[in-house]
């Protein structure tokens, strides 16, 4: 497993890797003081189910931290943004707007303490390098370039600056607590 290799390289000996599905974690109820989800929620078909499962394994008073890219609150902008992400990475399902993330957390029985957004300024070439499918780069460059020229911001401030196609990913770090 990649995580085990990274831990070994870092000299970490207090880490145990347990394979499982996020929708059915292989742990007892109230097993953990904290659960962290980093850049994963947008890959789940049912993020609400996953967040309820994370809550199940939290002890009372436990903390759930999520860090993920978020979508626009405008449905059409979010749909276009998500379509572009799926074209780049077919494992992408859907980024949530922050209001929907909050609702899922609250529906899971958590109290949202903070939700801190920030903007990552991106350049198309740098973003395309993240994918392991170089054959997608050309078509995405054409589509995103044309959208930018037509003023379709896609909820990500898609634009052309000089010779570069640029856009902004808004991410959010959210802290929620399981009160009981």
Image (cartoon, rainbow, N blue to C red):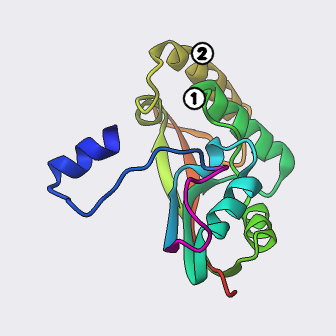
Q: Quick check: 1 left or right of 93? A: left
Query: Compared to 5, does 179 lie above or below?
Result: below
Looking at the picture, how far across and down is residue 8, in whole percent? 19, 48
Q: Magenta stretch: residue 26 in it?
A: yes
Instruction: From this view, report whether residue 40 is shown above or below residue 67.
Output: above
Q: Nearer the viewer, mark 2 or mark 1?
A: 1
Q: Residue furthest front?
A: 28
Residue 3: quadrant of the picture? top left
149 w.r.t. 47: above or below: above
Which quarter of the rendered picture does the N terminus lie within?
top left
In the figure, is residue 123 to the left or right of 82?
A: left
Q: How many marks?
A: 2
The residue singled out by tag 1 in the image is 89
What predominant SS class does the magenta segment belong to? loop
Asked whether 147 or 87 is in front, the reply is 87
Relative vertical location of residue 42 with respect to residue 113 in this rendering, above or below: above
Q: Say which element carries label 2.
A: helix
Give the magenta-colored segment's residue range: 23-32
Residue 139 — which label?
2
Q: Residue at x 67, y 49 (%)?
A: 23
Residue 169 can be seen, yes or no: yes
Residue at 52 percent across and 67 percent down: it is 35
How far is the residue under mark 2 from the one under mark 1? 13 Å
Left or right: 4 in relation to 125: left
């Amino acid at each position: 497993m990649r995580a085990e290799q990274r831990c070994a390289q870092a000299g970490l000996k207090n880490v145990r890797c347990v394979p499982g599905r996020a929708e059915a974690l292989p742990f007892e109820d109230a097993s953990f003081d904290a659960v962290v989800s980093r850049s994963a929620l947008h890959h789940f078909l049912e993020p609400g189910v996953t967040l309820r499962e994370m809550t199940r394994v939290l002890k009372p008073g436990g903390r759930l931290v999520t860090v993920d890219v978020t979508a626009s609150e405008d449905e059409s902008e979010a749909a276009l943004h998500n379509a572009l992400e799926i074209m780049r990475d077919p494992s992408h399902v859907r980024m949530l707007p922050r209001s929907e993330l909050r609702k899922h957390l609250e529906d899971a029985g958590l109290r949202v303490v903070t939700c801190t957004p920030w903007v990552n300024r991106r350049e198309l070439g740098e973003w395309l390098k993240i994918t392991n499918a170089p054959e997608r780069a050309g078509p995405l460059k054409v589509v995103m370039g044309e959208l930018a020229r037509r003023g379709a911001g896609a909820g990500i401030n898609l634009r052309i600056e000089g010779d570069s196609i640029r856009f902004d990913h808004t991410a959010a770090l959210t802290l929620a607590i399981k009160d009981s």
